[in-house]
């Protein structure tokens, strides 16, 4: 359904461009770890690949009532989203097991290490589930930067603005040296920070060393967000490294969609 109906329409309207598509293997398992700026990230990343890629999505996307609810559920299924109940203590385990099943079958699996959408376009601290997934499956991690989706679909907007959407794909990261160490929390944090640093290097985003969910909670309760002096005291990049000297990627010249 995705390729026959949804894909051509999105291609025609939004003219997505991709850079680094050659880094995705033609076959075999791989984890695509992306920044997360908007709901439509899960539509456009699979769209620019030659292989099927699935993400997990909130169960609520598939259980809505009425015409709107059925349309949302149908669209999510059409773009390959797998419903997972993210409520309760077993939510992370359910997501991990879903990913492991896909990877053990030699497929691609997409994940957002931040755990939720960025509330302000900055890159937030990664959760270690992506590291566990990499170490338990043995699959390489391919960092990805979505470009422009937060402008096309800011928080609260249902229908994305018509504009070019970009996807930048980095070189695969191999963590086989840590195999069997998936229960070591220091290793998991180190691997996660390495992945987030690679995403930051592709996206050119400013980094905030707190979880996106924590930042959203601060905003919702009216507490100050991490800015100014508080931000200056936090690491400039994942793992306490200096921030890479990169810029936000720009679209290729008109008429080109893939580089």
Image (tube, helix red, strand yellow):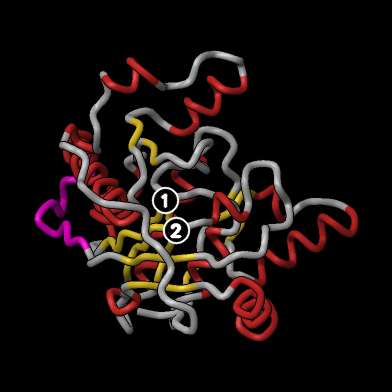
Which sits in the foreground, 94 or 78? Answer: 78
Total marks shown come to 2
Q: Position of residue 144 (x, y in %)?
A: 36, 60
- Label 1, residues with CA under 10 Å away: few <14, some 14-19, many ≥20: many
The stretch of residues the image draws in magenta is 173-184
Residue 4 magenta-drawn?
no
Quadrant of res 182 = top left
The structure residue drawn at horizontal position 41% and vertical position 31%, both measured from the top left corner, is 211
Q: Is residue 141 left or right of residue 258?
A: left
Q: Position of residue 241 (x, y in %)?
A: 16, 36
Which sits in the foreground, 131 or 33? Answer: 33
Q: Is residue 256 above or below residue 166?
A: below
Q: Which mark is residue 159?
A: none
CB atoms at circles 1 and 2 under 8 Å apart?
Answer: yes
Q: CA distance from mark 1 to mark 2?
A: 6 Å
Quarter of the rendering occupied by the N terminus: bottom right
Q: Which mark is residue 35?
A: 1
Quarter of the rendering occupied by the C terminus: bottom left
Quadrant of res 256 = bottom left
| SS under mark 2 | strand
Residue 177 magenta-drawn?
yes
Q: Main secondary structure of the magenta part?
A: loop
The structure residue drawn at horizontal position 80% and vertical position 63%, both measured from the top left corner, is 71
Name the residue at the front extreme.
253
N-terminal of the pair, mark 1 or mark 2, is: 1
Q: Which mark is residue 146?
A: 2
Q: Position of residue 57 (x, y in %)?
A: 58, 53
């Amino acid at each position: 359904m995705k390729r026959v109906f949804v894909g051509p329409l999105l291609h025609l309207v939004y003219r997505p461009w991709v850079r680094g598509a050659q880094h995705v293997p033609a076959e075999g398992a791989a984890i695509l770890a992306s920044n997360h700026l908007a709901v439509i990230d899960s539509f456009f990343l699979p769209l620019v690949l030659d292989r099927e890629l699935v993400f997990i999505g909130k169960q609520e996307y598939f259980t809505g009532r009425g015409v709107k609810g059925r349309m949302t559920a149908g669209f999510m299924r059409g773009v390959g989203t797998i419903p997972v109940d993210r409520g309760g203590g077993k939510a992370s385990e359910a997501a991990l097991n879903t990913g492991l099943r896909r990877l053990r079958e030699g497929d691609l699996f997409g994940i957002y290490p931040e755990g939720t959408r960025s509330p302000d376009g900055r890159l937030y601290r990664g959760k270690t589930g992506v590291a566990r997934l990499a170490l338990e499956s043995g699959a390489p991690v391919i960092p990805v930067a979505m470009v422009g989706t937060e402008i096309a679909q800011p928080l609260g907007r249902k229908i994305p603005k018509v504009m070019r959407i970009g996807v930048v794909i980095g070189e695969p990261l191999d963590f086989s040296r840590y195999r069997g160490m998936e229960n070591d929390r220091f290793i998991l944090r180190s691997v996660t920070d390495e992945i987030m640093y690679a995403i930051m290097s592709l996206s050119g985003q400013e980094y905030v060393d707190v979880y996106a969910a924590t930042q959203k909670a601060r905003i919702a309760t009216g507490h100050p967000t991490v800015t100014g002096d508080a931000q200056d005291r936090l690491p400039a990049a994942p793992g306490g490294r200096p921030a890479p000297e990169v810029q936000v990627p720009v679209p290729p010249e008109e008429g080109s969609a893939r580089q």
